[in-house]
Amino acid sequence: MPAAAVARVLRGLRIAARIAALREADHPAVPAGQQPALAGLTERARPLSEILADRLSADEPPPAPRRYTGWSPAHDRGGGYARLLDHLDAAARRGAARVDLDHALLDTLGAPPADETLPPWPVDCLLRPLAPSAGTDPVAALETASAAGVLDARFADGLRALHGGYGNGDAYRAFLAAVEERTGVRFVDLLVPPLTERSANAVRRPVTTRWWTGDPGPTPYYGTPGRHARYLPLDRISLRRSRGRLVAEADGRRIIPVYHATRSPAPPYDTLVRLLLAASHPAASYLVRLDALEAALPDRARLPRLTAGGDLVLAPATWRIDRVRLWQPGDDLFAKVRTLALLRRSAGLPRHAFARTAAGGKPVPVDFASLTALPQIERLCAREAGTALLVEEMLPAPGNLLLRDPLHGGAAVAAQLLLRLPHDQSAARLAAAAADALAVGGRHDVPGPSARRPAGAAHNR
């Protein structure tokens, strides 16, 4: 990837992180260590098995899985997030096709500085590259920016086999080892069985830590025997509070549980994951996603494309179509085609788009110039009740795909790009910031022995 494009992504990410922090300040999440399920924990260490047994025997239902539903209306009408929504709402009323957010605007809204919003942790940006133009259009659409080592985990072995190595995996392992060296903590990978045998690929990952816990059988996760970590039984882990944080320990030594799968685990592992990740590094669950703006501005029939400094698309343009403007089920084919053509022209819809019936719903790709759009929209409306149809521009559209497949005559392919940032910092330098984030009152709260391995234990890495 060209250095200039990487620099533009980083510039856009810094703006996106500030926007996400402004939104989060208006809707603060309950810290993992302060969740009701952990309210009874004190400074006295308690075995994980006891806590897990109490949670599984409790009558209250488990919390609903976290699901991204888009932007939310502002709670504090005088806050910076509310003023940001007012700015976007005013642009929508003017009929703007695009709104570009920059640092100057965010400064006036009271957003925290970018250096305070980006985590002390490597970040994976999931991008959809956009075709270059005069250099003024965004270089990519940002889907998510999340803590490293998760999105690429299932593909790491394949990439290593194809290319003779995988630099991202090696750098991430070096980063975790450097944090351990600085702090004396021990990272422990949490292995949780897949939902079904057919989805086993969802939990595959390379070996990145020297220890694992959870499922004692590592083969479905790490592959054939070889460079395996050491197993840490769950009954050796305890949890306690320390200076307002939740701390996990094994044999008196602080551990930092990490989870490198994208799938939500099935019961009872979902409870286990929540308990252990409440004691993880605060940056290990970092996530930025800024699409689905329509959830915060439900009264606007059209919302402009949202960009960050002209470098990244954060939210595509969206349209809210009242279903009464659609054809009737009993109309003949000609009437349906005419209604669709008139709707596309009057609303200014793009040819290629994603349609859904509610914010956060599963999008369906639609070609509004094709007869296939008719049954697609009918099935979508029949599947979910509602009065509106949400349409989101497709970025990039099929005619603007940037990547080509040389093995199939240069055919255009829809692709995602994973870019790890920062790209210009060593593992040791990044580890120093991550280590500082673990310290409380200048201490790392590691009462146990040193984290250094004994001589001759290289096979445990």
Image: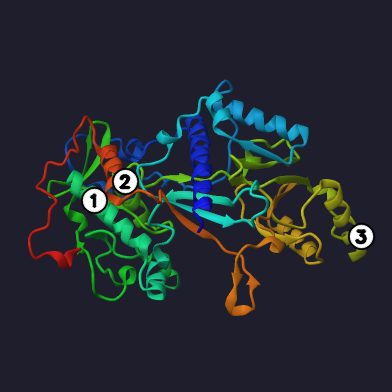
Circle 1: residue type: Ala
Q: Earlier in the sequence, mark 2 or mark 1?
A: 1
Circle 3 crowding by C-alpha within 10 Å: few under 14, some 14–19, many from 20: few
Q: Is residue 181 left or right of residue 434?
A: left
* Tally of marks: 3
Secondary-structure class at tag 3: helix
Residue placed most toward the observer, 83 or 401: 401
**Which residue occupies 80% across, 65% down?**
370
**Which residue occupies 11% across, 45% down?**
448
Q: Residue 291, labelled with which disc?
A: none
Q: Position of residue 310 (x, y in %)?
A: 61, 42
Q: Position of residue 42 (x, y in %)?
A: 22, 34
Residue placed most toward the observer, 283 or 268: 283
Residue placed most toward the observer, 160 or 89: 160
Q: Earlier in the sequence, mark 1 or mark 3?
A: 1
Q: Position of residue 440 (x, y in %)?
A: 23, 33
**Which residue occupies 77% across, 53% down?**
350
Name the residue beneath numbered marker 1: 178
Circle 1 crowding by C-alpha within 10 Å: few under 14, some 14–19, many from 20: many
Based on the displayed image, in which of its 4 quarters is residue 239 positioned?
top left
Secondary-structure class at tag 2: helix
Q: Residue 430, labelled with which disc?
A: 2
Q: Identify the image's colour scheme: rainbow, by chain, secondary structure or one colour.
A: rainbow
**In this view, the mark in front (1 or 3):** 1
Q: Residue 335, labelled with which disc?
A: 3
Q: Is residue 344 left or right of residue 103?
A: right
The answer, for residue 387, to whether it is visible in the render is no
Estimate the spatial distance between the alpha carbons at disc 2 and disc 1, rounded to whole Å: 9 Å
